[in-house]
Image: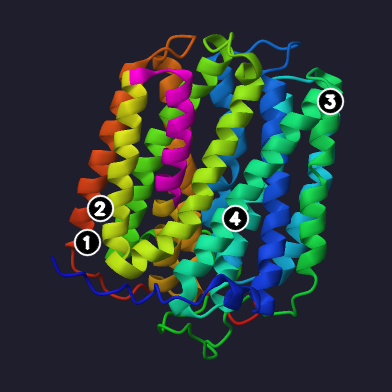
Amino acid sequence: MPTPPADPDGVRAGVATLLRTPGYRRLLAVRFAAQWGDGMFQAALGAAVLFNPERQADPLAVAAGLAVLLLPYSLVGPFAGALLDRWDRRRVLVTANLARAGLVLGVAGVVAAGVAGPPLYAVALAVTGVSRFVLAGLSTALPHVVAREHLVEANALAVTAGSACTALGAATAVALNTLVGAGDAGSGVTTAVAAAGPLLAGLLAVGFRRGALGPDADAPEGADPDGAPIIPTGTAVLHGLADGARAAAAAPPVAATFLALAAHRLAFGVSTLVTLLLFRYVFVDAGPLAGFGGVGATVVLAAAGLGCAALVTPWLVRRWGRPRTVRIALVVAGAAQLGLAALLSLPAVLAAAFVIGLAGQVVKLCTDAAVQADAGDGVLGRVFALYDIVFNVGYVLAVTATALLSPPDGNAPWLLAGAAGLYLVGLLAHDAQLRRRPGRAVRTHRSGPGAG
């Protein structure tokens, strides 16, 4: 069987070449610091909600905690994404990270005081909303520091290593929580340490010159690059989600990978909640892998899968192209979910964490490259806002549905089998979109250069 032509966005540069690019190297440093802090914060909040002996947790409480961690930017993203297409992204990375560091300290105080329920979730919402804004800013900035033909490889290193930093932050939180205690005071200390990540990220972002990360400001006076009239930023922000949806729909490669990613996140949401409940209530005699320690081991194995994805994704894309790479990843993830449903044991959970982490990250890297290569810079912020909705809202909906359907101890193999079926649905939807003809050029609302 002949080898398909290489993907034009999969040209190999090599890690050493990428790291010799000053802008890319600094953007990596900002991402690593920010995502390490994210991992610390998420794990600390998870410990406070689920594994804190001073609090009681049930499936719906876990679902509420995950919603707090993931939904905020998805709710404001369609509006904030438009701002990323108008504001200096360097300024966004500096100010948002510094603001986030202060907000994390505020959450630490609330946790240490023993506050639970809506008040805790309300302050955590602010932190995670800003965190998602920062990550969207990093993604929209990447095409300004590397060439288009190196986007897959640059994403493989940036996103995957960044996710590994998130896992490292989570593991740091687990270790620190063990030292300082799992009660309210200990969880507060662990949460406070997480502020170091965004603080360092904001300081590193200062090193970029103004305008170096976009958005492009080459529109002629009175109209944007596609000829649409310029309107005030405040009005354009309100059109953020619609603009992002139109831009994604007009590009079949973007729409196809969005659907594949949505299937993965729905399935991953199911397996995440089932796994957490199993560690909380079933794997209680697993020694060091019982409870929060087992969750930490699962996170480490998932991070190892992410690291492998960084190695195999550029090779797969160069050899087979993005579409076939996505198909392979969906099939592998679906098979892993079926295996987990059949065995439902601690070894199966650990193995599935690695395989699904790898396959899911391959889909995500291909989606990142599709957006950055096939959506114009003028709409990147809004498309990434839609991306965030696909990535997180679907995940939280799956977690919530699982919380309502699962038994309290998480012993529900039929739910995991259903999650495997979602990968098949994603595969069919992905292929259907790729057979669709591209849409017409997207006309979006834009304010003048430097507006905002």
Q: In this view, does 347 lie to the left or right of 22?
A: left
Helix, strand or loop at mark 3: helix
Spatial CA span between label 3 and label 2 = 46 Å
Q: Nearer the viewer, mark 3 or mark 2?
A: 3
Q: Is residue 368 left or right of residue 119?
A: left
In the image, what residue type sits under mark 2?
His
Spatial CA span between label 4 and label 1 = 29 Å
Q: Nearer the viewer, mark 1 or mark 3?
A: 3
Magenta span: predominant SS is helix
Q: Residue at x 54, y 37 (%)?
A: 301
Spatial CA span between label 2 and label 1 = 6 Å
- Mark 3 = which residue? 179
Q: Which residue is drawn at 79% across and 34% down?
A: 191
Helix, strand or loop at mark 4: helix
- Mark 4 = which residue? 161
- Between discs 3 and 2, the one toward the N terminus: 3
Q: Position of residue 326 (x, y in %)?
A: 32, 54
Spatial CA span between label 3 and label 4 = 27 Å
Say whether marks 2 and 1 touch (CB < 8 Å): yes
- Mark 2 = which residue? 430
Q: In this view, does 316 lie above or below 74?
A: below
In the image, what residue type sits under mark 1?
Leu
Q: Which residue is drawn at 47% across and 42% down?
A: 357
